[in-house]
Amino acid sequence: VTSGWAPPPPPVIKPAKKKLPPSVWFLIGAGAFFLVAGIVAAALLIFGGRSVSTNNVEIDVQGPTTIASGDTVPLLISIKNGNPTFMAGATISVDLPDGTRNPDAIDEPFDQYSDSLGDIEAGQREERTVRAVLFGAENQKLVIPIRLEYRTPGSNAVSVKEVEYTVLVTTSPVSVNVTSVREVASGQSVTVRVAVRSNAATPVANVSVSGEYPPGFILNGSVPEPVDGAYFALGTLASGQEKIVTVTGTLTGIEGDERIFRFTVGTGKDDGSAALGLSYMTNSTAVAIARPALGVTVSVNRETGETVTVPAGQSVQGSVTWANSMTVPVSDARVEVTFSGSAFDPKTVVANNGFYRSSDATIIFDKSYNPSLGLLQPDDSGTGTFSFTPRQEVRNPVVTLTIRITGMRAGSTVPVTSIVTRTVKVGTGLT
């Protein structure tokens, strides 16, 4: 039997559990709160809730996207309340474009439509139809703002919801066509024809035309007479009706120049002033200044400009040079120089190789004084001279010279004519 002593096994010591400090527990709780709050907020943002907002209000507009100017356009406006509570005292307003007319009274302007919708319950839909005659230029986009105002229970603030409806005008209600000759000699008469036609299905009221004349154009007359300058009032055009404006005048310029006549058609301002309130269409025509058949060059004190300034109280020396620019002879040519203006003194005119006719203040050069004018061969030319002394002590002293040359072209019974105008301004002195 073996006997002895063995030491006992060491005791098992369990580690003590560590306790978290209070600050860590606070951070954990705060993080969990914000996590839950974020989840709830995201759910309300995505899926909605009981919030009241203009985003929950729907405004739907049904109508044509393209129209012909002058058409009667119906717009169906639908308002739906998607809020969880009713909208109190809702009103709707529609701002219509300039020139819009009432379809039931075409002469009456229709600038704005407004109506009261009353209270709109949650989930309820209200509809209104707006009818208007819209006008606009071809390819013009008309923007129609629509505004909804309402209040919510328990609040005095006015909530506003706005949308815009756009419609494209494909054709103009009134068209304008401008025609004239392609070229004219300087100083010759030119006629411009302006045709205004209604393309609208309903009458277009207060139609007017505003024109722009080129430099060098002197108006002699028009049909009808303008209201002011180049502004013509045509009144009401029925559907398909056409009215004509004819403008006649004298056009001067340098050979090779191009003169543009531009006319705009539209409706006049409601206050009756000579201006367009709404423009529909603009058209133009170009007239080139061609080489005159009978050329005329005017010199005043050796200056050939359209406007010449001369000293007061001194004799003015003038000359007129004519030439046949055609390839055929011209017979019985006649050159006339007519004087007018506040500074013209008929007693001082001297015609060196012509005849001065005092009854109408005109110097005449013809074959009686210049035998070469009896028959001008191609490239033939000649000169007539004259002199005069302007008056003094007159306001705005000006002398206007109108030079007119005529002749018969060989083989034709229609006379050839050229007209040139020169302005002589007289210098003034101080006293």
Image (cartoon, grey):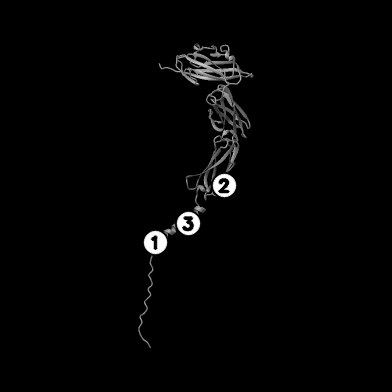
Image: 203 above or below 363 = below
Q: Quadrant of residue 261?
A: top right
- Nearer-the-camera pick, 299 or 9: 299
Name the residue tied to disc 3.
Answer: 39
Mark 2 or mark 3, whichever is nearer to me: 3
Q: Report if residue 49 is visible in the image.
A: no
**Which residue is nearer to you in this view: 210 or 236?**
210
Mark 2 residue type: Arg
Instruction: Write down the residue under mark 2.
Output: 125
Q: Is residue 60 above or below residue 307?
A: below
Dot 2 or dot 3: first in sequence order is: 3
- Furthest-bottom residue in this view: 1
Residue 282 in picture, x, y percent from top left: 56, 32
For the residues labelled 1 and 2, the Cα–Cα distance comes to 54 Å
Q: Residue at x 54, y 32 (%)?
A: 277
Q: Quadrant of the N terminus?
A: bottom left
Label 1 crowd bin: few (<14), some (14–19), many (20+), radius 10 Å: few
Disc 2 on helix, strand or loop?
Answer: strand
Q: Residue at x 44, y 58 (%)?
A: 33
Q: Dot 1 corresponds to which residue?
A: 24
Find the distance from the CA under tag 2 to the CA under tag 3: 33 Å
Give the alpha-carbon distance from disc 1 to disc 3, as whole Å: 23 Å
Residue type at the position of mark 1: Val
